[in-house]
Amino acid sequence: MATIIKSVKDIKSVLAQSERSIGLVTTMGALHDGHISLIKASKFDCKTTVVSIYVNPLQFGPSEDFQTYPRDLKNDLKICEENNVDYVFVPDDNEIYPDDTKKDLTMPPANLYSDLCGRTRTNHFSGVSTVVKRLFEVVQPDYSYFGEKDLQQLYIVRWLVKEFNLPIFVRACPTVRESNGLAFSSRNLNLSAKEKYIASNLYKALVMAKKNIRSGFFNVSKSILESLIFLSKFPEIKVEYFEARDKNDFNKVDDGKKEGFYFLIAAKVGKVRLIDNVEV
């Protein structure tokens, strides 16, 4: 049975007596098949698995969806129970940010912080870095698990571990998709059935760009343009960016690149912002 723990003091005390190694799956709740894949990876690797559930206010801008972000703790706990999670850490703001430590932000490097999603979500990645660093300090896991769907976040977590010399192995897990190709996301709960169908075209556009590169007749820019033309057929989709980034350093790639990079997209479908990517 999954043990629910709400305080930093209690989770530290329990884990001090737990078998190593410890795996941590950090979430904001509204758990889905993508999260379950991370839990299963932790269960495979580790003796003890911890799932944290905390909707972090620092990673939401003033006009973003903090208040409407899906929350369903009862179902989250059921999923954790069904997947044999050992401990579910459900802290409140005072446990994560005692004594107003919200002001002590952890800032990633500019090429990760201010690019792509960081252009419009100006405080997002400092909030992500701050809360992940805090959770790492509290849980002190041996392994941590992050989905490749949130690719920019994954690179920032890797930077965080390296920058602060944390003895944590960051395991990237493949994106899990619905039957129509739409990447699982907690925000999918805010899509109507019609919007879900339309949103599946984001993945189709990414796959199209990847196929065009592999054909040998298209460079990176042309592949992106063709995919944007395809997406323009759907007025409900408002593309924020569709770009390519190098797999090694996450920098922009030139048109001569044929492999070893990602296509990434962010777009709104209705009022819901979605992200996705494919590796080339």
Image (cartoon, rainbow, N blue to C red):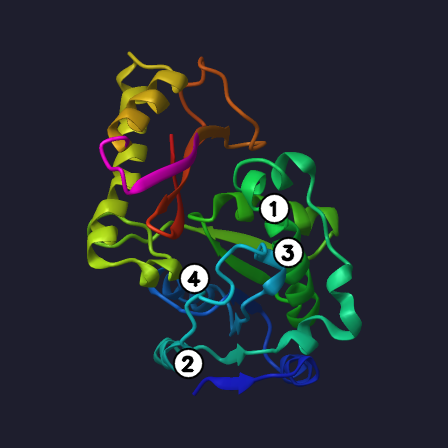
How far apart, in angstroms, are the residues tagged by discs 4 and 2?
15 Å
* Residue mark closest to the camera, 4 vs 1: 1
- The quadrant in which residue 267 appears is top left
- Is 235 covered by the magenta stretch? yes
Q: Disc 1 marks which residue?
A: 156
**Tag 3–tag 4 contact (CB < 8 Å):** no
Q: Residue at x 68, y 45 (%)?
A: 108
Q: Amino acid at mark 4?
A: Leu
User: Is disc 3 placed on a helix, strand or loop?
Assistant: helix
Provide residue 247's location: percent of width, then percent of height: 50, 32
How far apart, in angstroms, are the residues tagged by discs 2 and 1?
28 Å
Label 4 or label 1, whichever comes before in sequence order? 4
**Tag 4–tag 2 contact (CB < 8 Å):** no
User: Is disc 1 placed on a helix, strand or loop?
Assistant: helix
Which of the two residues, 123 or 235, is positioned nearer the viewer here?
235
Q: Which residues are magenta?
A: 232-242
How far apart, in angstroms, are the residues tagged by discs 3 and 1?
11 Å
In the displayed structure, 239 sits above or below 4; it is above
Q: Disc 2 marks which residue?
A: 77
Residue 12 is left or right of residue 73, and the answer is right
Marking on residue 38: 4
Marking on residue 127: 3
- Is 104 covered by the magenta stretch? no
**Tag 4–tag 1 contact (CB < 8 Å):** no
Which of the two residues, 61 or 76, is positioned nearer the viewer here?
61
